[in-house]
Amino acid sequence: MQEIRLFSGEMIPLERHKVRIVQKLELLPVEERLSKLQEAHNNLYLLKNRDVFLDMLTDSGVNAMSDKQQSAMMDADDAYAGSETFFQLEAKVQDLFGMEHFLPAHQGRGCEKVLADLLVRPGDLIPMNYHFTTTRAHIVRCGGEVLELLCAEGEVYTSDKPFKGNMDNDALRTLLKNSERNIPFVRMEAGTNLIGGQPFSLANLQECSGICREHDVPLVLDASLVQDNLYFIKSRETNCREMSVREIMRAIADCCDIIYFSARKFGFARGGGIALRESPLVNPLQELIVLNEGFLTYGGMSVREMAAITVGLEESMDESVISQGPEFIRYMVEELTKLGVPVVTPAGGLGCHLNAKEFVPHIASDEYPAAALASALFIAGGIRGMERGTLSEDRHADGSEAHASMELLRLAVPRRVFTLSQIKYCIDRVHWLWQNRELIAGLRFTREPKILRFFTGELEAVSDWQEKLVARFRSDFGDSL
Ligand SMILES: Cc1ncc(COP(=O)(O)O)c(C=O)c1O
């Protein structure tokens, strides 16, 4: 994908693919959107997909597949053990990462579980650029503690810094030199999810890797969002301009001892896996994979998905393929910025992130501003985003709220799924909401799970603000949906 200039002078991101399979969508009237939201207890995960118009919850497992992925799926070799399709996937991972071993898993958190079971002991400290929800949950489950060492600009909402996912390497150096606690590994996350899909630079990763090697601490890469990170390194890091995407991928892998990924994201399919070099960790990891995920030649994945991942990984080395998400996101970010809507800049991967702290500053963190904004946007447009803020944090052990450092509403842009007119519709409804933001108020729990509460928790509005929002919509849009 590349921006293209129209005769009018307008610049638009132009799709370099055509749509060959479609799914019909319904846009419910605003009153029904409210009642479906309330039936789902104000938790957008609990909505039925048939009631959603634009599903911008996530890109996980919902990116559009290519014709070549679909045809590879038909050709997959079905076997519990020794499937040829697995060996093709293994060869692709070995080729891209230059690592000898590939252990399959059913998805990203399956990798996180076995890595935490093997490597994390009570009292351990695991430094990382930033946590991800499931990653931290598994580390904490094993008695470890996460320490975020994100660079200073990482949590600044509006910035022109191109690599906000960088590790603070000075802090890491000091920690590894002085820490009295056991540090089983350092974790870097590509395309850092919870701070707005922000990348690290290759230079930063290389420095981080040097520090880890100096102190003999393994470096583990979460590559679930590496395809966006690759695109940003290629387009933003001056020293990498002449490198191919494949060369950048190998340079990243050369820095790491273990790489795991969710193939619901990297590979544009569903599954996951762990790659590593020859090491004493291989055998115990294999045992945990067999115990938790499945036999070593499928790890919980169907052979069809493995075939799709193999093709998807190769397609991720094509700049015109991996640019599609970030270019659409940049378009959204730029258009919303022109309209005065607070968004995370620079545009990252994964999705466009609204800054809920500034959008609804009148809502206290304890009443979940980003979740309230998510519910308001569903009312405004049948658009399902994902809260990435205090609601996504579990409470402290003493029961108090763990306030997130950023309150974001993520509008994910699954790759090749939406058209530009759908993106424009989304921008319009966000704009309308921005103009009516004073109507939005908070949410409170009516049922609150202890772990990963955002997935299944139930909430209600603190007042009748949602009904008032519906009334304003009707008066502004008349009979229109
Ligand atoms: C950075 C990162 N790590 C791990 C995961 C977990 O992967 P999965 O959803 O496949 O379990 C995700 C999923 O969104 C992710 O974004």
Image (cartoon, grey):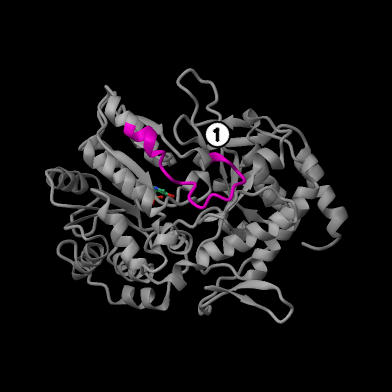
Q: Is the magenta stretch mostly helix, strand or loop?
A: loop
Is the residue 400 above or below the residue 380 in the image? above
Q: Residue at x 26, y 40 (%)?
A: 212
Amino acid type of the residue tagged 1 in the rendering? Ser
Q: In this view, does 140 lie to the left or right of 452?
A: left
Q: Percent from the top left, x then y, of residue 75?
A: 28, 77
The range drawn in magenta is: 155-173
Is the residue 121 above or below the residue 255 in the image? above
Q: Percent from the top left, x then y, of residue 324?
A: 51, 68
Let me know if residue 169 is in the magenta part: yes
Q: Percent from the top left, x then y, of residue 30?
A: 75, 54
Q: Can residue 28 be seen in this view?
A: no
* Residue toward you, 184 or 302: 184
Q: Which residue is drawn at 53% across and 80% down?
A: 18
Residue bearing the label numbered 1:
405
Q: Which residue is drawn at 44% across and 61% down?
A: 238
